[in-house]
Amino acid sequence: MAQTSRIDQWLSRCGYCSRREARAWVRQGRVLVGNEPAHSAEQRVPGGEIRVDGEPLEAPDGLLVLLNKPAGRVCSHQASEGPSIYDLLPERWQHRNPAINSIGRLDHDTTGVLLLTDLGDLIQRWTSPRHKVPKVYEVTVDQPLDDTLIPLFASGTLQLPGEDSPCAPARLQILDDLQARLELTEGRFHQVKRMFGVTGRTVTRLHRSRFGEIELGDLEPGKWRLLEVPDLTRS
Ligand code: URA
């Protein structure tokens, strides 16, 4: 059943305005419930019934965003850490509550599929190693690859320095001398770079091409699109 809340709460949660401003917007007739002007900011309604200036309220029950992360952006809300992925999203979303966060992080220089959401359950589900969501990376390294890496990465025994447990089995496909495709089901800190580092190679380019079933399609670097929120009760 659709969740009902006060109109002023919906508007502030979705980043449109403060609750005080919402009261003014209602008085000014800018807010409709269905096709009727809202009569009070305290009216309790499902978010899906609200229109502001003629437009439906944006993703009132939570959003899921696919971003093609460009190089040179950090997955952080801290301005001090440099240009942020969050600055690539609509300004209004910075004011949503709960806040939008990335589902896992990519390094500053990593490009490709990055998902963001304001739904905590989705973050929990898709970052938990228990759920083994496959992530696929296109990797370029500085020194030639060889086939011995395939069983090593698949073995479930590869130990990263400073970690208590070995990496879960990972699928490596060697594409040419310096390029490979790696599928992981975990998301440890700098995992791809550290796995190749153990073998004496440095990753010079890293691009995530898939997260679960989600790929970029024709999405340009720096661009985003909204995805349908999956029903977690059915998986
Ligand atoms: N592994 C890394 O080393 N870096 C990333 O950004 C993602 C996975």
Image (spheres, rainbow, N blue to C red):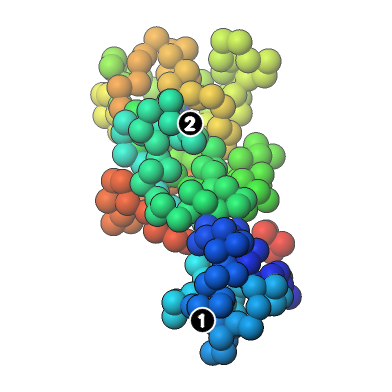
Q: Residue at x 54, y 38 (%)?
A: 104
Comparing labels 1 and 2, the label whose residue is closer to the camera? 1
Q: Residue 23 location, x and y as percent?
A: 60, 70
The tally of labels here is 2
**What residue is pinned by disc 2?**
78
Q: Residue 171 location, x and y as percent?
A: 49, 34
**What residue is pinned by disc 1?**
29
Q: Nearer the viewer, residue 27 or 178?
A: 27
Question: Considering only vertical position in the picture, is 202 above or below 156?
Answer: above
Is residue 62 at least partly visible in the picture?
Answer: no
Q: Which of the two labelled residues, at mark 1 and mark 2, occupies the earlier sequence position?
A: 1
Q: Nearer the viewer, residue 95 or 226?
A: 95
The numbered disc on residue 14 is none
The reply to whether dot 1 and dot 2 touch (C-beta < 8 Å) is no
Please, what is the three-letter code of the amino acid marked with disc 1? Gly
**Distance between the alpha carbons at the discs numbered 1 and 2:** 37 Å
Q: Quadrant of the N terminus?
A: bottom right
Mark 1: which secondary structure?
loop
Q: Is 49 placed left or right of 235 in the picture?
A: left
Q: Residue at x 68, y 15 (%)?
A: 164
Q: Is 234 placed left or right of 80 in the picture?
A: right
Please, what is the three-letter code of the amino acid marked with disc 2? Gln
> Where on the image, by quarter, is ligand 1?
top left
Q: Nearer the viewer, residue 72 or 167?
A: 72
Question: Considering only vertical position in the picture, is 113 above or below 145?
Answer: below
Q: Residue 63 location, x and y as percent?
A: 54, 59
Is residue 224 at least partly visible in the picture?
Answer: yes
Q: Residue furthest bottom?
A: 35
Q: Would you call the spot at circle 2 few (<14 residues within 10 Å), some (14-19), or many (20 or more)?
A: few
Q: Quadrant of the C terminus?
A: bottom right
